[in-house]
Amino acid sequence: MELPFYIFCILFAFMFPGLPTLQADQSVLDLFPDFHDMKSKISTTYIRWSRKQCPNNDYTELVYSGYVGGGNHDEKGSAVEPVCLPKDPDFVKTSGGFEYSRMYGAEFNSNNFFASNSQYQDVPCAVCRVRQASSIIMIPGKNRCYTGWNMEYNGYLASNYYYYPAAGSYICIDIQPEYVDGGSSWNGQSKLFFFVVAKCGSLRCPPYKEGYPLTCVVCSK
């Protein structure tokens, strides 16, 4: 049995002197029966970009699906982070004055890089809940998870075009993207997604390679 466990047991005995002594072959949870089902109640969420559904497995469920929204690629004050907008919005006010931010839809604009017919397609999204997991990470430059983590989905890293005035964050576009029905025409009034390539210099090459598109993977644990 490892040293950290013994240290924990000593601290536990001082904190709860009235409880039965913890034996070497006992679990701490044995002293708290109500905690046995705690793991089944733990969950976390993530956004699956460019898909309408969550992965088909036994531990992930759909919260809602919708449309990717964000700031205009050509507006300096645009918000950096994209969001997943629901299909059934609720409004309270009908106007708000003359000073405001803006929410646009989103499109692919990478010469069909993400899929053979992805150019100008509007991008959907799905908010997913993972049961019995407490952590979600997106790993850029990988298409598989590290040992001990479960893969939710993988794909290609995407962001704003490097020359546009608006900033953009990095997201993971699913390797098999779907599109918003009826959204296949160019509309410059939108957030645009481009694939991301490695640029050598301060970025170490190798292991990275100049001009290679970066993959990504979303993992849970």
Image (cartoon, helix red, strand yellow):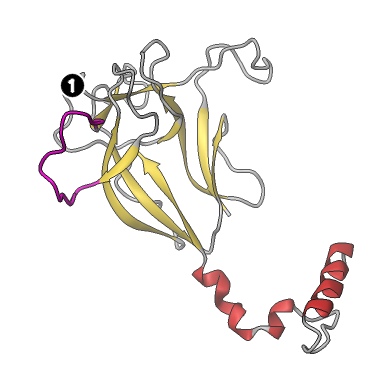
Residue 215 located left or right of residue 105: right
Type of residue at label 1?
Asn
Q: Locate residue 109, reporting x and y percent.
A: 30, 20
In the picture of the structure, the residue carrying the numbered disc 1 is 187
SS at mark 1 in the image: loop
Q: Locate residue 189, reporting x and y percent.
A: 20, 22
- How many numbered callouts? 1
Q: Residues within 10 Å of mark 1 (few under 14, many from 20)?
A: some
Residue 186 located left or right of residue 206: left
20 falls in the magenta region: no
Measuring 33% from the left and 22% from the top, which residue is drawn there? 77
Measuring 50% from the left and 70% from the top, which residue is drawn there? 41
Stretch of the chain drawn in magenta: 86-102
| Closer to us: 153 or 103 | 103
Question: In the rendered view, would you say 200 is above or below 106?
Answer: above
Q: Locate residue 184, reporting x and y percent.
A: 18, 27
Question: In the rendered view, would you say 106 is above or below 10?
Answer: above
Q: Is residue 68 visible?
A: yes
